[in-house]
C-alpha cells in the first residue's frame, strides 16, 4: 500500500535541524526545539509502527516514479520497529543533552547535527534502494564525525580519526559492492534485485559481491577483526553523543546485514559458517577486552562488541528461532546500550571521573539513583526475567539444535564475562567506600531540581522501556517472530514494492 507518511519521521528531524540553524546563538531555544521535535518524531514513529503491525507493508515512491525505476521507501515490521526504537532513544538523548552537553558545544551546532544524524538513521531503516542506503549511511557518517569532534579535545580528535578512517574504508567496500551489483543486475531497487540475483548466471561473482557487503557492513557493525575503532573512539565524546553511537550506530550496520542477507544474498552453507565464526570471535574478543578495562565507557564499548556477536550469530544460524532471538536481542540492546552511556554520564556528574579505581560510595550517598542504575545493569546481564534473558534462550536453543557448539560456548563465555565485569563494576563503583586520597567532584549535588530531573529522566525512560521488554516478553517474542517470518519469506516485501510486477 502506498503511504506518503512513511518518511514523516525523516522530514521532522530535517525540519527541526533547519529551524535550529535559525537559532544558532540561542541555546535555550535549540533545547526546546530538540525535545519538542523528538517528541513529535516519537508520536509519528508509533503511528507508523501501528500501521504496519497488522502485517501491511507500506511503500512510497519518491517523485511518483514507480519501482524499480525510482527511489522507494518501504516500511515493514522490521524497519518500523527500528524507527520506533530510534525515536525512543533519540528522545532520551535529546532530553539528556539539554543538561549534559555544554553551552559551547550547543552554540557550535550540536543539536542541528544531532537531528541530521537521527534523520539519517530513520532514512537508512526505511529506504528500499541499495544506493539510497549508501547515501543515508554517508549522512550518518558525516553527522557522527562532526558530533565526535565538537569541542576539539585531543582525545576526541584521535578517536575521530580512527572512527572516520574505518568508516571510509567500510563505505569504499559498500560502494564497490553496489557498483558490481548494478553492473551484473542492472538494478538498485532491493525488491527488484531479490528477483534478479537468483537468475544471474555467474553466481561466483554474486558471492564476491556479497563479500564486499559483508566487509562493509561488518566494519560498521564492529565485527571481528575490524572492531578496534569502536572502543578506541566511543569513550572520547560527551556522554550524550556516546549514547547515540553506542545504542544506534552499530545497529544500523546490523540492520543492513539482516536486510541484505535475507533479501538479496540468501546465505549458503559457506556464508552461514563464516558468519558463525565471525560471531564467535566477536563475542570472545569483546568479552576478554572488557575484562581488563577500568574506564566505565571503555568497558561498555567492549561489551557493545561482545553483544554484536550475539546478533551476528543469530544471522549465521539463519533459522526462524535464531533470527527471532537475534531480533529480540537487537531490540533489547538498543535500549540498554543507549542507557549505559547516559548512566556513565550521570556517574561523571556525581564523581567527576569514570575511572573505576577512583570511584566508590555511590550507593551509600545516592541509594535511589543506584537502584535505578541496577535495573539497567541487570537488564544488560540478562538476570531473569529482564530483557537480556529471553533472547538468549532462542539463541542457545538453535545453537545446540544445529550443533553449533562453538557459538553456544561463546554465548556462555560472553554471558558469564558480562556478569563478572558488571558485578565487579557494581562492587567498585557503588558498594566500596570512595578512596580516601581522591577528591570527589560532585556537580550533581549542586544542581537545581530541574537539571537533576533532566539528567535522570532519560535513564528512567529507557530503564522503563527495558522493563517493559522484559516483563512483557511474550509480546516482544511475538513481534520478533513475525519479523523473522518476514525476513525468511520476502515475497510480501517484494510484492508490496513492485506491485505485482514480478
Image (spheres, rainbow, N blue to C red):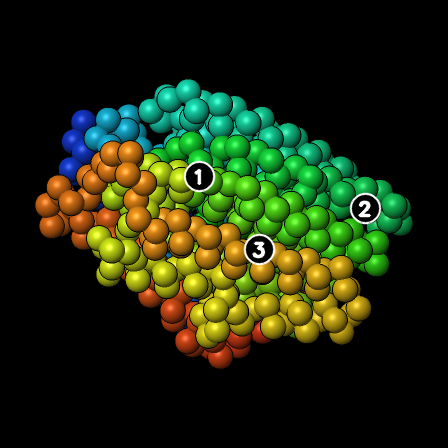
Q: Give the farthest residue toward the left.
A: 448
State the residue position of label 1: 295
Label 3, residues with CA under 10 Å away: few <14, some 14-19, many ≥20? many
Q: Say above or below: 229 vs 65.
A: above
Element marked by disc 2: helix
Q: Position of residue 29 (x, y in %)?
A: 16, 38
Residue sitting nearer the eye, 115 or 398: 398
Residue sitting nearer the eye, 257 or 17: 257
Label 2, residues with CA under 10 Å away: few <14, some 14-19, many ≥20? many
Q: Position of residue 298 (x, y in %)?
A: 48, 40
| Distance between mark 1 and mark 2 Cα atoms | 44 Å
Label 1, residues with CA under 10 Å away: few <14, some 14-19, many ≥20? some
State the residue position of label 3: 417
- The structure residue drawn at horizontal position 70% and vertical position 48%, both measured from the top left corner, is 281
Task: Let me know if residue 54 appears in the view.
Answer: no
Q: Say above or below: 375 vs 169.
A: below
- The structure residue drawn at horizontal position 73% and vertical position 39%, both measured from the top left corner, is 212
- Sequence-wise, the earlier of marks 1 and 3 is 1
State the residue position of label 2: 206
- The reply to whether discs 2 and 3 touch (Cβ–Cβ < 8 Å) is no
- The structure residue drawn at horizontal position 72% and vertical position 67%, both measured from the top left corner, is 399
Q: Position of residue 84 (x, y in %)?
A: 41, 59
Amino acid at each position: 500500500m502506498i503511504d506518503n507518511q512513511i518518511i514523516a519521521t525523516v522530514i521532522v528531524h530535517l525540519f527541526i535541524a533547519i529551524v535550529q540553524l535559525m537559532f544558532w546563538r540561542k541555546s535555550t531555544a535549540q533545547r526546546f526545539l530538540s525535545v519538542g521535535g523528538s517528541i513529535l518524531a516519537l508520536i509519528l514513529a508509533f503511528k507508523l509502527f501501528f500501521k504496519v503491525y497488522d502485517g501491511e507493508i507500506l511503500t512510497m515512491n519518491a517523485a511518483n516514479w514507480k519501482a524499480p525505476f525510482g527511489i522507494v521507501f518501504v516500511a515493514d515490521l522490521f524497519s518500523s520497529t527500528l524507527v520506533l526504537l530510534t525515536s525512543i532513544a533519540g528522545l532520551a538523548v535529546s532530553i539528556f543533552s539539554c543538561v549534559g552537553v555544554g553551552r559551547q558545544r550547543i552554540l557550535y551546532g550540536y543539536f542541528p547535527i544531532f537531528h541530521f544524524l537521527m534523520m539519517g538513521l530513520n532514512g537508512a531503516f526505511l529506504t528500499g534502494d541499495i544506493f539510497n542506503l549508501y547515501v543515508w549511511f554517508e549522512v550518518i557518517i558525516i553527522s557522527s564525525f562532526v558530533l565526535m569532534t565538537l569541542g576539539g579535545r585531543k582525545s576526541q580528535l584521535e578517536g575521530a580519526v580512527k572512527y572516520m578512517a574505518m568508516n571510509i574504508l567500510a563505505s569504499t567496500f559498500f560502494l564497490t559492492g553496489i557498483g558490481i551489483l548494478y553492473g551484473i543486475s542492472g538494478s538498485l531497487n532491493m525488491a527488484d534485485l531479490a528477483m534478479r540475483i537468483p537468475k544471474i548466471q555467474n553466481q561466483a561473482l554474486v558471492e564476491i559481491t556479497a563479500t564486499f557487503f559483508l566487509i562493509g557492513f561488518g566494519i560498521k557493525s564492529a565485527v571481528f577483526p575490524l572492531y578496534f575503532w569502536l572502543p578506541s573512539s566511543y569513550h572520547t565524546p560527551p556522554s550524550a553523543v556516546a549514547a547515540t553511537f553506542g545504542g544506534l550506530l552499530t545497529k544500523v550496520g546490523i540492520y543492513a546485514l539482516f536486510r541484505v542477507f535475507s533479501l538479496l544474498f540468501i546465505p549458503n552453507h559457506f556464508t552461514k559458517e563464516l558468519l558463525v565464526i565471525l560471531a564467535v570471535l566477536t563475542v570472545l574478543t569483546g568479552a576478554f577486552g572488557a575484562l581488563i578495562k577500568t574506564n566505565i565507557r571503555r568497558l561498555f564499548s567492549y561489551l557493545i562488541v561482545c553483544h554484536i556477536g550475539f546478533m551476528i550469530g543469530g544471522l549465521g544460524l539463519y533459522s526462524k528461532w535464531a533470527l527471532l532471538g537475534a531480533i529480540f536481542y537487537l531490540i533489547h540492546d538498543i535500549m540498554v546500550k543507549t542507557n549505559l552511556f547516559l548512566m556513565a554520564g550521570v556517574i561523571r556528574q556525581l564523581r567527576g571521573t569514570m575511572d573505576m579505581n577512583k570511584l566508590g560510595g555511590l550507593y551509600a550517598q545516592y541509594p535511589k539513583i543506584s537502584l535505578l542504575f541496577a535495573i539497567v545493569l541487570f537488564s544488560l546481564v540478562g538476570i531473569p526475567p529482564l530483557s537480556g534473558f529471553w533472547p538468549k534462550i532462542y539463541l542457545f536453543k538453535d545453537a545446540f539444535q544445529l550443533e553449533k557448539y562453538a557459538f553456544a560456548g561463546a554465548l556462555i563465555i560472553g554471558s558469564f564475562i558480562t556478569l563478572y565485569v558488571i558485578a565487579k563494576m557494581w562492587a567498585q563503583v557503588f558498594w566500596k567506600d570512595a578512596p580516601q586520597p581522591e577528591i570527589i567532584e560532585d556537580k550533581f549535588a549542586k544542581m537545581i531540581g530541574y537539571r537533576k530531573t533532566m539528567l535522570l529522566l532519560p535513564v528512567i525512560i529507557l530503564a522503563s522501556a527495558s522493563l517493559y521488554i522484559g516483563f512483557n516478553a511474550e509480546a516482544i517474542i511475538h513481534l520478533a517472530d513475525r519479523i523473522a517470518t518476514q525476513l525468511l519469506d520476502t515475497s510480501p516485501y517484494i510484492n508490496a514494492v513492485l506491485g505485482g510486477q514480478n
